Image (tube, helix red, strand yellow):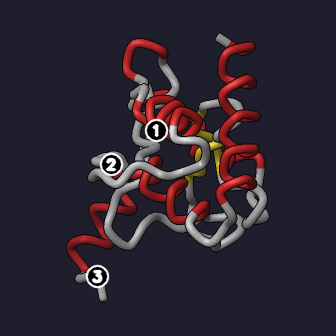
Amino acid sequence: MPCKALRELQRAYGTGEEAKILLQPFGVRGQDSGEELQIQYDVLKSEFQPAMQQHSYSQEEILFIQEHIGRFHLNDPQYRSGKLMEFIRNVIDGEGRMPAYEYNNLVVELFAEKLKPLERAEILKICEKIYIAGFLSA
């Protein structure tokens, strides 16, 4: 349970004109929807975006999340990590076998977790599609 001081700090960072920061832990709740403001990673587009599939955000809340993404340069090419594409290339080279090393990247860890229950052929097919999409959008 967050203490009063943390909630006050979150409110200050969430309501200031130039603030727009999604503080962790415990997140930030939208003032319109009351839902936690969250970011998701679109693997095919290789970009962070508001998690709108799971939430009903207002336009103001979507803007808040987009400003957070912009403030921390999460989608800027010079700050992007190539770890996901490196992982995908390793899966393709391994014909659907996932590499057995520590991924050291949250997006890669979450992606690998989603792939674990799938058959090798399906994993390979997914990774090939993402690799091609990434190659075409580069």
- In the rendered structure, find residue 120 and report the number of the disc placed on it: none
Q: Nearer the viewer, residue 19 or 89?
A: 89
Disc 2 residue type?
Tyr
Q: Is residue 12 above or below residue 77?
A: below
State the separation of the CA atoms marked 1 and 3.
36 Å
- In the rendered structure, find residue 2 and report the number of the disc placed on it: 3
Q: Which residue is under mark 2?
A: 103
| Residue 98 placement (x, y as % from top left) | 48, 52
Disc 1 residue type?
Phe
| Of marks 3 and 2, the one in the foreground | 2
Left or right of 75 in this view: 56:
right
Q: Secondary structure at mark 1?
A: helix
Give the residue drawn at x 44%, y 30%: 86
Q: Is residue 57 above or below residue 4?
A: above
Q: Secondary structure at mark 2?
A: loop
Dot placed on the residue nearer the N-terminal end, 2 or 1? 1
Q: Which residue is under mark 1?
A: 87
Q: Nearer the viewer, residue 59 or 133?
A: 133
